[in-house]
Image: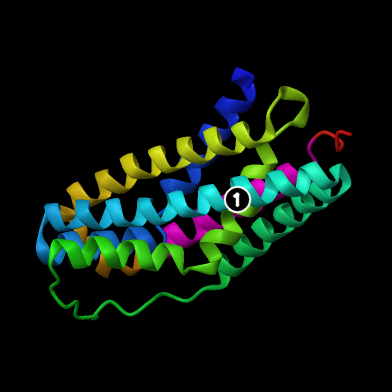
C-alpha cells in the first residue's frame, strides 16, 4: 500500500475519531461515573466490537470485488453518499439531555456492554462499509489484505483516541457532557468532516477496472 494513500486514510480517520460521537460520550460518562479504569474497560469493549465489523467488512466487500469490479465501484459511490448523509443528519441533530443517571456496572459488564453496543449497531457496520472502500485500490494488490490493514489501523487509532478521552474524563468529563456549547461545536465539526470526506470520495479518481 502506498504511503500517500495510507497517510490520507490515517488523517481522515483521526479527523473522524477526534470529533466526539455517541461512543465517546458513553466512554466519558462511564469514566466520569466509575473512574478511569471503567472508562478504559468500556473502550476495550467498544473496540472489540469494532474488530467484528472490520472482519465482516473485509469478508463481505472483498467478496463483492471478486464477483464484480462494477459492483465494488457502486459500493464506493453509495458509501460516499452515505457519508454525506451522515454529515447532514449530524448537523441537524439536536443537543441531547445531560441529566441522565448511569447505573454502576462491573468491569465484565462494562466490557460486554461495549461489545454488544458496537456489534449490534447497524450504523457502525454501515460506516465501515462506507469508509474503508474509499481507500482501497485493487491495483495495489490483495484487496482483503488492504481491508484488514486499514480496519486494524482504524481500530488501533480509535483505541488511542478513545483511551485519551477516558483518561481525561476524570477531570473534564462532567464539563464535556454538560456543556451545550461543546455539544454544538462537536456536532458541526463532525458533520462537516463526514460531508467533506463523502464529497472527496465521490469526486476522487475514476473507478478502476
Q: Residue at x 47, y 38 (%)?
A: 152
Q: Main secondary structure of the magenta part?
A: helix
Q: Residue at x 28, y 53 (%)?
A: 43
Q: Residue 108, image x and y in percent?
A: 18, 63
| Element carrying mark 1 | helix
Q: Nearer the viewer, residue 90 or 113?
A: 113
Q: Residue 110, image x and y in percent?
A: 22, 64
Reply above or below: 103 against 120. Answer: below
Q: Which residues are magenta?
A: 184-204
Task: Say which quadrant the C terminus sits in.
Answer: top right
Task: Say which quadrant the N terminus sits in.
Answer: top right
Asked whether 193 falls inside the magenta stretch, the response is yes
Q: Residue at x 76, y 49 (%)?
A: 64
In this picture, residue 130 sits left or right of residue 187: right
Q: Residue 154, image x and y in percent?
A: 47, 40
Residue at which label 1 appears: 57
Residue 196 can be seen, yes or no: no
Q: Nearer the viewer, residue 158 or 202?
A: 158
Q: Nearer the viewer, residue 92 or 134?
A: 134
Reply above or below: 93 against 146. Answer: below
Mark 1, other Cα within 10 Å: few <14 / some 14–19 / many ≥20? many
Q: In this figure, what is the number of numbered marks? A: 1
Asked whether 146 falls inside the magenta stretch, the response is no
Q: Residue 188, image x and y in percent?
A: 51, 59
- Asked where in the image residue 134 lies, by quadrant, the reply is top right
In this picture, residue 40 sits left or right of residue 154: left
- Asked where in the image residue 23 lies, by quadrant, the reply is bottom left
In this picture, residue 44 sits left or right of residue 63: left
Amino acid at each position: 500500500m502506498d504511503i500517500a494513500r495510507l497517510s490520507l486514510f490515517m488523517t481522515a480517520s483521526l479527523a473522524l475519531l477526534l470529533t466526539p460521537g455517541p461512543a465517546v460520550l458513553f466512554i466519558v460518562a462511564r469514566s466520569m461515573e466509575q473512574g478511569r479504569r471503567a472508562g478504559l474497560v468500556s473502550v476495550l469493549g467498544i473496540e472489540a466490537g469494532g474488530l467484528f465489523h472490520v472482519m465482516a467488512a473485509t469478508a463481505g466487500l472483498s467478496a463483492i470485488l471478486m464477483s464484480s469490479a462494477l459492483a465494488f465501484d457502486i459500493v464506493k459511490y453509495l458509501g460516499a453518499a452515505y457519508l454525506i448523509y451522515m454529515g447532514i443528519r449530524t448537523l441537524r441533530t439536536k443537543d441531547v439531555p445531560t441529566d441522565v443517571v448511569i447505573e454502576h456496572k462491573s468491569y465484565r459488564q462494562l466490557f460486554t456492554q461495549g461489545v454488544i453496543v458496537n456489534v449490534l449497531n447497524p450504523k457502525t457496520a454501515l460506516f465501515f462499509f462506507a469508509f474503508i472502500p474509499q481507500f482501497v485500490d485493487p491495483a495495489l494488490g490483495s484487496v482483503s489484505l488492504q481491508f484488514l490493514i486499514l480496519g486494524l489501523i482504524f481500530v488501533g487509532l480509535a483505541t488511542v483516541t478513545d483511551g485519551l478521552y477516558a483518561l481525561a474524563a476524570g477531570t473534564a468529563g462532567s464539563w464535556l457532557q454538560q456543556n451545550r456549547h461543546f455539544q454544538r461545536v462537536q456536532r458541526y465539526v463532525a458533520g462537516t468532516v463526514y460531508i467533506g470526506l463523502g464529497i472527496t470520495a465521490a469526486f476522487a479518481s475514476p473507478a478502476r477496472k
